[in-house]
Image: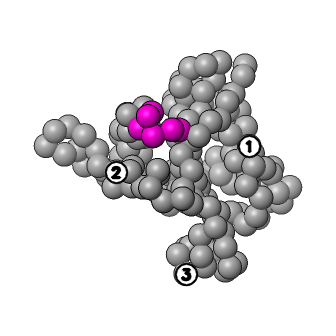
Amino acid sequence: MTVTLSLCPYEDKTVLSNLIQLYRYDSSEFEGHILSQHGLYSYKYLDHQWTEEYRRPFIVKVDGEIAGFVLVILDVPRDFTKLSNREKTNVISDFFIMRKFRGRGIGRHVAFSIFEQFKGAWEVRQTSENKPAYAFWKKVIAEFTQDSSY
């Protein structure tokens, strides 16, 4: 199994937009997202992925098949982070692996790749009601840092 993580170019904005629809649907049970009158979920930061230099949108593929995405924000100042007290912190703002690819270590591989590519302090955001995401990140962060505190 080959897992690849690549920056999503603006030309593939539609791919990311479509994946965000799946992500918002998937997380709606925890976050209560509501469909628009056109049957779509809103995501106000889509265009920001290419207009703000500190954002990095990544597409995840498994054996060449699209499997998810990760939205990263680099060097966020302390005033804009929720947990970190460091001067600058990297943030995983959104992380999505499609259901058919879950439970195979793909999310762990992707998270480790992101942490290794962008060294420094990290803040990983998830909704407190999303117990599966909380358990995933608790395990992944403990493994990556070799520390059980989360």
Is 11 within the magenta? yes
- In this view, the residue in front, 140 or 19, is 19
Tell me which numbered mark, 1 or 2, is placed earlier along the sequence.
2
Tell me which numbered mark, 3 or 1, is placed earlier along the sequence.
3
Dot label at residue 43: 2
Amino acid type indicated by mark 3: Asp
**Res. 148 image quadrant:** bottom right
Amino acid type indicated by mark 1: Ser
Amino acid type indicated by mark 2: Tyr
- Quadrant containing the C terminus is bottom right
Residue identified by numbered label 3: 79
Residue under the point 67% across and 30% down: 4
- In this view, the residue in front, 54 or 138, is 54
Position of residue 101 measured from the top left corner of the image (x, y, whole percent): 59, 26
Residue under the point 47% across and 51% down: 49
**Crowd band around label 3 with a 10 angstrom C-alpha radius: few (<14), some (14–19), many (20+):** few
